[in-house]
Amino acid sequence: MAGGGTEAFPDLGEHCQDPDCKLLDFLPFTCDGCKLVFCLEHRSYKSHNCPKSDHGSRTVSICETCSIAIETTGFDEKGIKSLLEKHERSGDCDPNKKKKPTCPVKRCKEILTFANNLTCKYCGVKFCLKHRFPTDHVCNKKIINTAGTSSRWNERFMEALSLRNQKGCGRGSSVSSKSSPSVRSF
């Protein structure tokens, strides 16, 4: 048998190329670094000591001031340090980007994310789910502009409805049909 498999199925599976393993694996993994075949246990770069483990990899450093990730692939420690200093000198490094929005209610430290915040329909301020109701936060109950547009829509709707009723359209029509029902019930 050349590549692997069993006597009945000689082309099925391959042996792990780790020198200590040689397991016949029916779903082998090919390392994208060294191009050798390995079993599930030895498929990672670290487990088979791949000489090309950094092949295609990227390294990133995080700015401590603004929490932005900066790619540092191919730089040594001195180069990374100078890259971070260059970033801090540029106008891109803003410490305000690091601060996350929190609930504006006193003593509430809940960080607002896309899933746990709600905008109050009266004051238009974003709150955490615990303080979403006007009674739970100090709401000044100003009606925001969206409510004004809906009231205008309601006025136009009611006007159109009254015009429709005046013209005799719809159910309230003055013309009544005297025809007998088409279906009789017994």
Image (cartoon, helix red, strand yellow):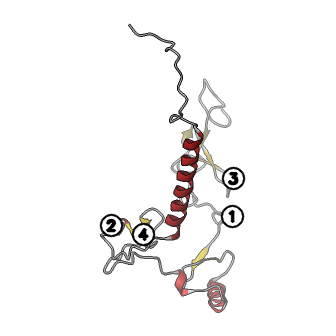
The quadrant where residue 56 appears: bottom right
Question: What residue is shown with label 2?
Answer: 130
Q: Is residue 42 above or below residue 143?
A: above
Spatial separation of the CA atoms under disc 4 and disc 3: 63 Å
Q: In this view, does 68 lie above or below 40?
A: below
Spatial separation of the CA atoms under disc 1 and disc 3: 13 Å
Numbered tag placed on residue 66 in the rendering: none
Identify the amino acid type marked 2: Lys
Question: What residue is shown with label 1?
Answer: 56
Question: What residue is shown with label 4?
Answer: 122
Question: What residue is shown with label 3?
Answer: 35
Number of labels in the image equals 4
**In this rendering, which labeled residue sits more in front, label 1 or label 3?**
1
- At which x and y percent is residue 48? 57, 57
Identify the amino acid type marked 4: Tyr
Identify the secondary structure beneath mark 2: helix
| Labels 1 and 3: the sequence-earlier one | 3
The quadrant where residue 73 appears: bottom right
| Labels 4 and 1: the sequence-earlier one | 1
- At which x and y percent is residue 119? 45, 67
Image quadrant containing the C terminus: top left
Q: In this view, does 14 lie above or below 17?
A: above
| Labels 4 and 3: the sequence-earlier one | 3
Identify the secondary structure beneath mark 3: loop
Identify the secondary structure beneath mark 4: loop
